[in-house]
Amino acid sequence: MITARGIITLLVLAVLFALAVVWVSKQGGWKGEGCGGNCSSCHQHCDTPEKKH
């Protein structure tokens, strides 16, 4: 039987997981758009930023 303390713990973990998913999606997601160790590629991207419409 799950106690009230167990239910509260599960709810807190679910909320933290949801917040983590939202934070990662706002940071660019899991698409792999980061440097990936290639710093020159990142600098080139910053030197010529894409225009936002």
Image: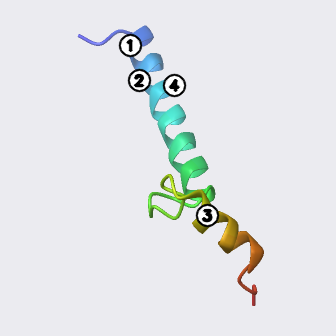
Q: Which mark is residue 12?
A: 4
Residue at image position (44%, 64%) is: 31
Residue at image position (75%, 87%) is: 51
Q: What element does badge 2 sit on?
A: helix
Quadrant of the image occupied by residue 43 = bottom right
- Tell me the amino acid under the disc marked 4: Val
Q: Nearer the viewer, residue 1 or 45?
A: 45
Q: Position of residue 48 (x, y in %)?
A: 74, 80
How much space separates mark 4 and mark 3, taking CA atoms? 41 Å
Check whether the beta carbons of the residues at disc 4 and disc 2 lie within 8 A of each other: yes
How much space separates mark 2 and mark 1, taking CA atoms? 6 Å
How much space separates mark 4 and mark 1, taking CA atoms? 10 Å
Quadrant of the image occupied by residue 30 = bottom left
Q: Can you identify the residue that label 2 sits on?
A: 10
Check whether the beta carbons of the residues at disc 4 and disc 1 lie within 8 A of each other: no
- Tell me the amino acid under the disc marked 2: Leu
